[in-house]
Image (spheres, grey):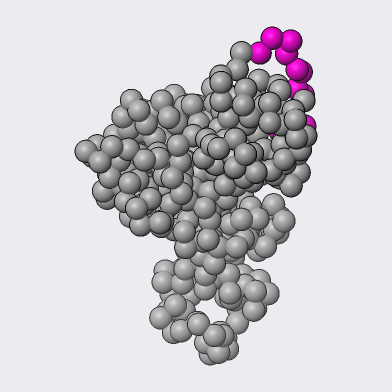
Amino acid sequence: MLSETELLYTLALQRVKNLGDTSAKKLVRVVGSAEGIFKEKKHRLLKIDGIGSLKLKKLSLTEQLPAAEAELHFIQQNKINYRYFLDKEYPERLKHCLDGPILFFETGTIDLKNRKMISIVGTRKVTTYGTSFCQKLIETLAPLNPIIVSGFAYGVDITAHRAAMDTGLQTIGCLAHGLTQVYPKNHKKYVAKLEENGGFITEFWSNDPFDRNNFLKRNRIIAGLSEATIVIESAEKGGSLVTADIANSYNRDVFAVPGRATDSQSQGCNNLIKSNQAHLLNNAADLIYMLGWGLEETSKIPQQKQLFVELTEDEEKVLSYLQNNQKEVLDAIALECKFPTFKVATLLLNLELKGVVRPLPGKLFEAI
């Protein structure tokens, strides 16, 4: 946590026009503090690699201090939690993003420690298929207890938040405005429950209004927080495709749900897959397999072997193979059972949920 004085100067630094988070963080690392930056001679700051006169043109404490003092007062009066880029509480994945925010604010009960985290984005004009897929995906992932991140907008965003809350998962809404308002206003009814099951994150100050120009900054946080970004549905152009592009630039996994060639709300997803910018996502098993989830964590979930379990013919084939061969990796199971790998991933997940198979470290599986 920053001292009151250093928080004040950091707020002032955050507000300097043309500077940006990348340069602001570089200055802090070189000079040692935000306060020191404002007190340092400009000609010395100009010697820092990548720091030009244009970026320092608005570096004036007298110009930034009044607004920073007002924001500091708001933070203290409302007991707003914040995360500073050099603090250990700052999200680890976001630390690896060069343009991650120097400082951001949060409300609710967010707990980011040792957690799986995925971002789910998509069109505001979500279809019945997109809604159903999103709900089923989150419901299936629930035993792994991931955090679901989205943008609290209409369509896919709010569907993901609601599905997470309905299954008892933590969910985080990333906002493109300050914490004193709600956008869209119709979503005000979800605020209290979402804060009980996670909360909101924003780098914008308390009274910063909603502005479409803020989406790009908001989207980089959505992409940066998570190990993977999932695009459920998207038209040929849309904000979710921007988020996917940012996630790719951060070397994060991107997944897209395919749709029919004639569906307008699937064009963006289909194009991501076609151009190898996203993995094809048919079900939760694809995600679990690609991210290497479901090994140590799911083995900790109490499982009780049922006396009478209804299995499909394909599930019976996989289970029988494991019973005869003990521990085996997914690819070998697929090869021996003569099923595609993605199908075996689904079958193994189903068998795991039915309590007859369990995952082991090293991407191994065994019959119980």
Q: Which residues are magenta?
A: 298-309
Q: Position of residue 199 (x, y in %)?
A: 56, 36
Q: Position of residue 119 (x, y in %)?
A: 50, 44
Looking at the figure, which quarter contains the N terminus? bottom right
Of residues 348 and 275, the one nearer the viewer is 348
Does the image show residue 296? Answer: no
Of residues 76 and 31, the one nearer the viewer is 31
Q: Is residue 305 magenta?
A: yes
Where 319 sits versus 174, above or below?
A: above
Where 274 sits versus 361, above or below?
A: below
Q: Could you tell whether 128 is left or right of 246 in the image?
A: left
Where 296 sits versus 368, above or below?
A: below
Residue at image location 73% in from the left, 13% down from the top: 306
Looking at the figure, which quarter contains the C terminus? top right
Q: How many marks?
A: 0
Residue at image location 74% in from the left, 47% down from the top: 362
Q: Could you tell whether 84 is left or right of 159 in the image?
A: right
Of residues 274 and 159, the one nearer the viewer is 274
Q: Could you tell whether 223 is left or right of 237 in the image?
A: right
Q: Is residue 276 magenta?
A: no
